[in-house]
Structure formats: C-alpha cells, structure tokens
Image: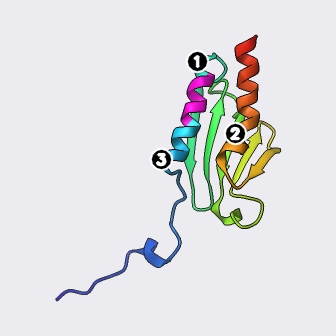
C-alpha cells in the first residue's frame, strides 16, 4: 500500500477562518437592507488565518464604513465578534453576532425614517 501523508490543515487549527452560513445570512441581510436604503453600494470579504472580515462600503473607492470581524482567538476573552468603524475604532464587541450588529441596525432605522 502507499504512504498516507497528512494534509497540512489537519494539524488542529484551520488554515482559514470563515463565516458559517447562518452568520453570513445575517450579515448579508443587513447589507441588503442598507443597499435598498441607498446607503451602501459595495462589500468585501477577507478570509484570513486569524480573522474573517466583512467590510461594507458607501463607495468602492473609500475605506469601509463598517467592518464586521470574526476572531475566534478572542472567543474566551472579549468575544469573537467586533464592529469596527471607518477610522478603526471598535464600536461594539461581543460573543454573539446580533448585539454586535445592533448599532448598525439602529442606524438603518433612522435612515428609513428620514
């Protein structure tokens, strides 16, 4: 029989952090509502070794207005979810996605009322 060589990613840690289907559905639902309101026009997803980042842009040539970051390494500390604004300040951090997205959803409600 042949020699079985283990895959490098099987060493215990994933080589890339990603969003689960339910998480991405929640984020894209918010993104779709903001696009429908005319506030966001583009997005980017960055999947790295330490974090998965969803960035929402008002225009494609600008810095992202918001970044939603998933960092599993911070799961037992401050929480693996973070909402970061345009200048890089962390607006909200938590263990669950819903409360972290709350400031953006409140802003969406103000956009609809105007």
* N-term mark: 3 or 2: 3
Mark 2 — residue?
A: 101
Mark 3 crowd level (few <14, some 14–19, many ≥20, 10 Å Cα): few
Using the numbered discs, state the Cα–Cα distance from disc 1 to disc 2 in whole angstroms: 18 Å
* N-term mark: 1 or 2: 1
Using the numbered discs, state the Cα–Cα distance from disc 3 to disc 1 in whole angstroms: 22 Å
Q: In which quadrant of the rendered view does residue 99 lie?
A: top right
Determine contact: label 3, label 1, CB under 8 Å. Answer: no
* N-term mark: 3 or 1: 3
Question: Could you tell me what secondary structure mostly forms the magenta stretch?
Answer: helix
In which quadrant will I find the N terminus? bottom left
SS class, disc 1: helix
Task: Identify the mark at residue 77; answer none if there is no mark.
Answer: none
Picture coordinates of residue 79, whole percent (x, y):
72, 58
Q: What residue do we see at 64% from left, 38% from top?
A: 55
Q: Is residue 76 left or right of residue 8?
A: right
In which quadrant will I find the C terminus? top right
Q: Is residue 71 magenta?
A: no
Q: What residue do we see at 72% from left, 49% from top?
A: 82
Mark 3 — residue?
A: 21
Using the numbered discs, state the Cα–Cα distance from disc 3 to disc 2 in whole angstroms: 16 Å
SS class, disc 3: helix
Mark 1 — residue?
A: 36
Q: Where is 92 relative to 37, above or below? A: below
Highlighted magenta segment, given as a residue range: 28-34
The residue furthest left is 1
Q: Is residue 65 left or right of residue 26?
A: right
Picture coordinates of residue 77, whole percent (x, y):
76, 65
Q: In which quadrant of the rendered view does residue 92 lie?
A: top right
The residue furthest top is 114
81 and 4: which is toward the camera: 81
Q: What residue do we see at 54% from left, 35% from top?
A: 28
């Amino acid at each position: 029989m042949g020699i079985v060589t283990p895959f490098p990613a099987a060493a215990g840690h994933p080589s890339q952090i990603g969003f689960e289907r339910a998480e991405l559905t929640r984020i894209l639902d918010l993104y779709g509502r903001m696009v429908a309101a005319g506030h966001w026009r583009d997005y980017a997803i960055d999947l790295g070794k330490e974090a998965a980042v969803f960035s929402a842009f008002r225009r494609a040539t600008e810095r992202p207005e918001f970044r939603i970051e998933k960092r599993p390494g911070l799961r037992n500390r401050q929480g693996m979810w973070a909402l970061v604004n345009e200048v890089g300040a962390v607006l909200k951090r938590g263990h669950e996605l819903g409360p972290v997205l709350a400031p953006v959803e409140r802003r969406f409600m103000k956009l609809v009322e105007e």
